[in-house]
Amino acid sequence: MKAKLFVIGLFLLAFVACTSRAKVAEHGQSEEGPNPELSAIDSLMWRQPDSALAVLQQFAASPKADSLDELNGHYCQLLISELLYKNYYDQTNREELLKATAYFDSLCNCTGVARNSSTIAFLDARAHYINGVGYYERDSIMEACKEYLKALEVMEGNFEKDELTGHRARFMAYTYNRLGDMFSEQFMMEPAIECFGHSYEFCKIDPASPYSVSNALYRIGLQYNKMKKKNSANYYYERAFELIPDTNNLIYRNLESSRALLSYQMGHPAETSLKTLITMVKLAIDEEEQLTRFFTIGSIYFEEAMYDSAFRYLEPVFQHTNDVVMRVQAADFIRVIYDSKGMGKNSDEYVRFAAANKKSNGQNNAEVLQLNKQFKEYKDKQLERQTSDEKNKERKKVMARTVEIVVPISLAITLLIVFLIRKRHQKNLSEQEATAKLLQNANARLQAEKEQLIQQQTRVLCKAPSSSYEALMKETICFDLRQRFGRTEIITTNKSSFYADMAISARDKQALTHAVERHCPNFGPLLKAQCSEFTRNDFELCRFLLIGLTEPQVAVLLQKDYSTIWKRAKEIKKVLQTAELEHGLRHVLFEISPAE
């Protein structure tokens, strides 16, 4: 290992020497874009980081490294940081990485880099990510979180969702995993679940390994277990177990160990769980993994008050593991064991270690508050950006539809006019004016009829409440759907798939439709009269709103994004003009079709 580190040190010195002589293009921008050799090393890094590091060493020692411009000099420094991290070395070019990050930021903020904008944006996001790794390794959690979130902002601000594939999708999964792990360490389980959920989605697009998808689900299950939501934890453990391709890997052993612990926590015999855990100890491939299994076994023995057995497993953990959190917990357990035997003096070493390495509640609370603040600010920016993007897309769609309609009509009218002019050149201008006036009068009549129809619809909407509404609400399906959520609070920032067990079945949908038709026989036709563009999904949403369900609850039942349901409900309210009506949307929907 020392010899290899020595080689790395020489490599870095050689590279710094050669890149210090790199050519700087005018205005600090590359004239040709990323260097082909560096791009090839970059591509290799995603598949074989050890081979990529060896190739980069050869490149740095070659004359080609002397001709790098400023862009590629910083690009090369970024590759060094990434390859050192992927090959488990310390980040030794910290200053050069910070300069590279600032440089890529400046290019992303510059308006004159359109030619390589997507490439530059990806490099900028990667620089912030690996910079966050450096901060995290130096125990600067706040700075690390800020860099990870910045990496996500750069990606989401420069790429459409369907462009996040391949290496970009894998990078997004890496970043969300780092954030999820960091939130998990601070016992911020809900943000961690959200991050691991996003990681799961990107792992499905481009998994870094055959175990990536299972690992993401497993991590979600761990968070639910921390929250003592054992059924949810078991659900994700089982999903992870179903998707794991083989049993000869660390993810499988972690999953089996966690399932065994959860089984014990759910009241099953300790002996069964301990048997599984001891088997996992035998399959461990290194000391750190073995100590992790020891800790779980010792914890179960401790909970069973079998202190001698617990001590036999916890003592090696305290003495040899590199995980400080695990050592602190083991020290606390051992202290209790000594106290229970009246041997308190023997616990001094463990007490001192725990006291020296535990953060105070004040420190923990301050860190959690700050991390929550950063994550909330990121989510607010994300929602604002998504809303803006959706408005722009809708505007483009409207313009496209307008062009599709107006251009053919305009062309047809133009051809007609030309034809008429040629055929009827002897007609005088007064006849043309008379024709135009007839068209104007026809449009005026159509507009008057439209306004009259709107007035009639408004009078229908403002009818007095009907007592038949109570009969509808007593229908079994209506009562069941409202009671399904009980006291469960729907977290709108979560994916609806997190509440998969609450999804509505096709049978229940049909039952609700029949119930509405019984009490509101003209519901569909009259609602269609309010807006001819209503779709089947709009009618379905109206039926849910009619029986008093909220937008978050509807999103969970239909397993759709909350923002999609909320926006469509808002449009329906606007169409039905319920903002100023006394009885609200639910009553107006019912009174559209009163029972006959």
Image (cartoon, rainbow, N blue to C red):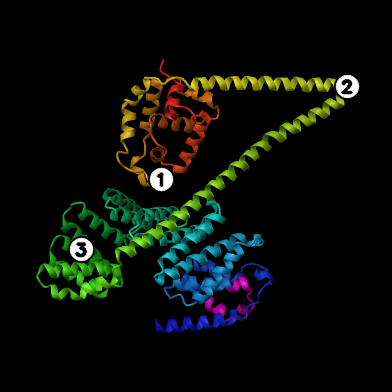
| The stretch drawn in magenta includes residue 60 | yes
Is the residue 486 above or below the residue 325 in the image?
above
Residue 284, quarter of picture: bottom left
The answer to whether residue 45 of the structure is visible from this angle is yes
The earlier-in-sequence mark between 1 and 2 is 2
Residue 347 x, y percent position in the rendering: 17, 73
Asked if the magenta segment contains residue 307, the reply would be no
Mark 2 crowdedness (10 Å alpha carbons): few <14, some 14-19, many ≥20: few
Residue nearest the observer in this picture, 83 or 314: 314
Foreground residue among 469 and 401: 469
Amino acid, disc 3? Ser
Q: For the residues labelled 1 and 2, say whether their Cβ atoms are less than 8 Å apart.
A: no
Residue 492 image label = 1
The one of 287 and 344 positioned closer to us in this rendering: 344
Report the residue marked by disc 2: 428
- Write down the region rendered in magenta: 56-73
Q: Residue furthest right?
A: 426
The residue most toward the top is: 596
Circle 3: element type: helix
Q: Residues within 10 Å of mark 3 (few under 14, many from 20)?
A: many
**Label 2 vs label 3, nearer the camera:** 2
Badge 2 marks a residue whose secondary structure is loop
Task: Specify the principal SS of the magenta part.
Answer: helix
Mark nearer the viewer, 3 or 1: 1
Q: Residue furthest left?
A: 342
Q: Residue 525, can we see it?
A: no
Number of on-image labels = 3
